[in-house]
């Protein structure tokens, strides 16, 4: 029922009061959610910045190890070692719930491998191939972690914006409109009560006057 359609009756007054209580409760809960999401956003942003720095360092280290491996084993030897890996690294996708927001939860699968899982064996290659493989596996783990954090930050930002719009709508539109309607109904009821009191007083005077008449 639109606010404009509410009549200045007792039932209308109770209806507006219930709506006001509900709006204030929702506003309070959404404001608490917004504060919580902002704290989580700060935490994730700080963590993402640290992971980004580590990612840059691991990328530089992996490039360096690859250059050493290519120098020791040759480009062909490095390529053959890479092609011998049968299981490609990947990840599974899940979600974790934070203040009602579904944040991505990425789980690496076959990223960190044993020597046997790499497939190229230890007899035909030197340790520099293993070092390069370790470096790139660490780099890939860092990429997955950074992707998870940045995806979570994006979703949090989107939900923070939606929640802020709802909080503002309640705070600056819905609750003020209900407050004005409540005040209008109370004033109308006060006026109706005054008119009714005046009417009853007049009736009483008329009855008293008639009773005194011979």
Image (tube, grey):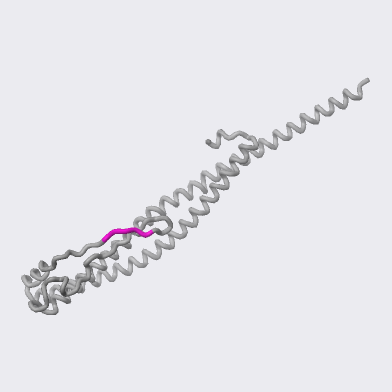
Is residue 29 toward the left or the right of residue 138 in the image?
A: right
Quadrant of the image occupied by residue 97: bottom left
Q: Relative to the observer, which residue lies in front, 124 or 183?
A: 124
Q: Relative to the observer, which residue lies in front, 31 or 49?
A: 31
Quadrant of the image occupied by residue 95: bottom left
Percent across and percent down for residue 24 are 55, 49
Main secondary structure of the magenta stretch = strand
Percent across and percent down for residue 195 are 73, 31
Is residue 88 toward the left or the right of residue 38 in the image?
A: left
Q: Where the C terminus falls, by quadrant? A: top right
Q: Residue furthest front?
A: 116
- Location of residue 172 with respect to 56 vertically, above or below: above
Residue drawn where x is 6% and y is 70% of the image: 76
Is residue 190 toward the left or the right of residue 159 in the image?
A: right
- Location of residue 94 with respect to 127 vertically, above or below: above
Q: Residue furthest right?
A: 214
- Location of residue 168 with respect to 108 vertically, above or below: above
Q: Which residues are magenta?
A: 92-96
Residue drawn where x is 41% and y is 52% of the image: 161
Percent across and percent down for residue 4 are 55, 34
Count of all numbered marks drawn on residues in the image: 0
In magenta segment, residue 55? no
- Location of residue 125 with respect to 179 vertically, above or below: below
């Amino acid at each position: 029922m639109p606010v404009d359609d509410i009549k200045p009756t007792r039932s209308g007054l109770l209806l507006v009061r219930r709506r006001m209580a509900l709006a204030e409760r929702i506003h309070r809960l959404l404001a608490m959610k917004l504060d919580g999401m902002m704290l989580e956003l700060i935490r994730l942003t700080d963590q993402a910045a640290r992971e980004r720095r580590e990612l840059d360092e691991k990328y530089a280290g992996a490039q360096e190890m690859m250059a050493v491996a290519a120098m020791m084993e040759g480009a062909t030897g490095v390529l053959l070692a890479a092609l011998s890996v049968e299981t490609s690294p990947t990840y599974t996708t899940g979600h974790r719930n934070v203040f009602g927001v579904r944040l991505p939860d990425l789980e690496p699968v076959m990223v960190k491998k044993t020597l046997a899982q790499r497939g190229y064996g230890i007899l035909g290659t030197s340790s520099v191939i293993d070092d390069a493989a370790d470096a790139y596996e660490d780099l890939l783990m860092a990429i997955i972690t950074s992707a998870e954090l940045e995806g979570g930050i994006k979703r949090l930002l989107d939900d923070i914006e939606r929640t802020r719009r709802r909080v503002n709508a309640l705070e600056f539109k819905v609750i003020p409109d209900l407050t004005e309607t409540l005040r209008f109904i109370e004033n109308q009821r006060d006026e109706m009560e005054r008119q009714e009191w005046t009417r009853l007083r007049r009736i009483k005077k008329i009855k008293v006057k008639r009773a005194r008449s011979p």
